[in-house]
Image (spheres, rainbow, N blue to C red):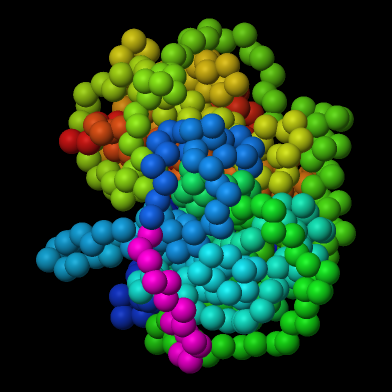
């Protein structure tokens, strides 16, 4: 049985571990990047996805569940088809080495697409009450259950108001083997990075459409497993996302009977390999019931009152005031168009980017996370460090970014070669104009909030990663991509300023070559 601190240490990348690793990918056993139910009925909405015209930069700048002022009236039911399409659907098809490659709405480690979305709905638009699985390849929905089962999620969350009041709540899951094939035990980290980019899109399209939307990390896991008919050794729930309000669960459906289901699935590959550390880490982070979920959220309120977790001491370092553009002059690229435009930048020029665009990307992407645990005054569990290489008017160096004041605090010197080395020797990272590391004190997080806190820290960093993608691709001349890294070497490089903290995610952006 492993706790999150042990799991994190055991899955750290280091030069020695990579040199000693003899693992090779078995292409003949590569899993399919999506699941196929063999015999479930399907529902195909009779309309095309229709994203809101709200600018992406406004849609991602929300720090709480309420939609931005720029969004339209969200009095209509949420458009479930549009939300799923722009969260995890296929937005374009690229040609790679002469072969067509479907390109998904949100980035995923290794393009292995192991995260699935399920919708648990009441009577919502074209959808009858039921439990649905979204198939990104067809745009259709597998019908797992008919009837209103939102009461199961409400009870599992401790009757959290956003869950009990939403016309639809999405469940994000990871089907482990689809990522383990390449990344093995590190998949538990990737589950939250990759679901985070999907949740970032989902929140942006929902809130850009005028709907209340919120990520919910506090819920009992086993009832959700039973509702979806999952085997946690193979696939498990990660987080909930509520969309909309004003549709409370009725007393008649508050505690529906949940008969067991075990829908048949087509095998992912010929010989799936088990990596027990992944489902074990997930099991150690479970919450037992709704009361435990509610108590877990209460710990965050108590933490704000008692300590200052997540607030770094002021080291007195020199600060630079950034100047992001205001809403009136910011890029007006709509959120749907931005998601469709998003790419995966493979080469960067060394040309500098403007200080205002740099500041705007950070400002809009890193204001905060609409999540249940942060409903009080705790801003989050992660901090941000930037390795700046080519930003007009800002000296090359390492800085801590302070989102509340839009300031950079000088930490130390860096260079492009060092930046590439820290990112598993990937020199392209050093070519980018800036590298953004989201870091957390894993020991403190787990000590205060248990193994569930580790899930939340990884998810928060994943959502920030997704928002950094959107903020970058809202600007025509910018491109970016997420990368992995040597964990301990990054921690050492940022010390002593970031003592105790370790990297969660890395995003590099700049001008594409």
Residue 420 in view, yes or no = no
Q: Is residue 32 left or right of residue 346?
A: right
Q: Position of residue 512 (x, y in %)?
A: 22, 36
Boundaries of the magenta span:
35-49
Q: Is residue 86 above or below residue 31?
A: above
464 up-or-down from 153: above or below: above
Residue drawn at (44%, 86%) of the image: 267
Residue 148, located in which quarter of the rendered image?
Answer: bottom right
Is 489 included in the stretch rendered in magenta?
no
Q: Is residue 50 visible?
A: yes
Horizontally, residue 306 falls left or right of residue 25, namely right
Q: How many marks?
A: 0
Query: Where 278 falls versus 410 (above or below)?
Result: below
The percent position of residue 409, horizontal first and vertical second, equals 53, 15
Report x, y in % for residue 80. Answer: 50, 62
Q: Nearer the viewer, residue 109 or 51?
A: 51
Q: Nearer the viewer, residue 334 or 311?
A: 334
Query: Is residue 46 covered in magenta?
Result: yes
């Amino acid at each position: 049985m492993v706790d999150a601190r042990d799991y994190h240490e055991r899955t750290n990348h280091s030069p020695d571990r990579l040199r000693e690793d003899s693992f090779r990918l078995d292409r003949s056993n590569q899993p399919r990047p999506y699941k196929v139910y063999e015999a479930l009925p399907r529902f195909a909405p009779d309309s095309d996805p229709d994203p809101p015209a709200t600018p992406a930069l406004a849609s991602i700048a929300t720090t709480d569940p309420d939609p931005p002022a720029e969004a339209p009236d969200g009095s209509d039911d949420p458009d479930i088809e549009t939300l799923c399409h722009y969260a995890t659907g296929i937005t374009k098809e690229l040609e790679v080495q002469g072969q067509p490659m479907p390109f998904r709405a949100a980035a995923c480690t290794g393009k292995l697409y192991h995260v699935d979305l399920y919708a648990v709905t009441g009577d919502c638009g074209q959808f009858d009450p039921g439990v649905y699985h979204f198939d990104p390849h067809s745009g259709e929905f597998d019908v797992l259950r008919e009837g209103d089962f939102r009461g199961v999620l409400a009870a599992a969350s401790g009757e959290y108001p956003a869950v009990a009041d939403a016309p639809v709540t999405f469940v994000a899951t990871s089907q482990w083997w689809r990522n383990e094939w390449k990344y093995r035990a590190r998949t538990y980290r990737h589950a939250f990075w990759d679901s985070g980019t999907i949740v970032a899109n989902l929140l942006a399209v929902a809130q850009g459409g005028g709907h209340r939307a919120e990520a919910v990390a506090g819920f009992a896991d086993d009832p959700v497993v039973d509702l979806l008919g999952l085997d946690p050794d193979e696939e498990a729930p990660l987080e909930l996302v509520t969309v909309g309000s004003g549709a409370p669960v009725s007393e008649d459906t508050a505690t529906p009977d949940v008969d067991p289901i075990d829908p048949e699935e087509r095998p992912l590959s010929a010989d799936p390999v088990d990596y027990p550390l992944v489902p074990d880490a997930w099991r150690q982070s479970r919450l037992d019931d709704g009361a435990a979920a509610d108590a877990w959220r209460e710990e965050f309120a108590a933490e704000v009152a008692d300590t200052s977790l997540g607030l770094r001491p002021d080291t007195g370092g020199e600060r630079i005031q950034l100047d992001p553009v205001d809403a009136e002059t910011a890029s007006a690229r709509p959120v749907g168009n931005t998601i469709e435009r998003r790419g995966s930048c493979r080469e960067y020029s060394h040309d500098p980017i403007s200080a205002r665009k740099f500041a705007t990307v950070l400002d809009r992407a890193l204001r905060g996370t609409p999540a249940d645990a942060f409903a009080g005054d705790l801003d989050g569990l992660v901090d941000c460090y930037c390795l700046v290489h080519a930003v007009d008017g800002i000296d090359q160096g390492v800085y801590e970014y302070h989102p509340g004041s839009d300031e950079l605090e000088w930490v130390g010197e860096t260079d492009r070669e060092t930046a590439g080395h820290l990112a598993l020797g990937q020199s392209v990272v050093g070519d980018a104009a800036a590298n953004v590391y989201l870091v957390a004190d894993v020991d403190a997080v787990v000590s205060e909030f248990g193994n569930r806190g580790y899930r939340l820290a990884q998810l928060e960093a994943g959502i920030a990663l997704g928002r950094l993608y959107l903020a970058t691709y809202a600007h025509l001349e910018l491109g970016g991509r997420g990368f992995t890294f040597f964990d301990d070497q990054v921690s050492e490089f940022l010390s002593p300023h970031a003592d105790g903290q370790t990297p969660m995610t890395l995003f590099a952006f700049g001008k594409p070559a």
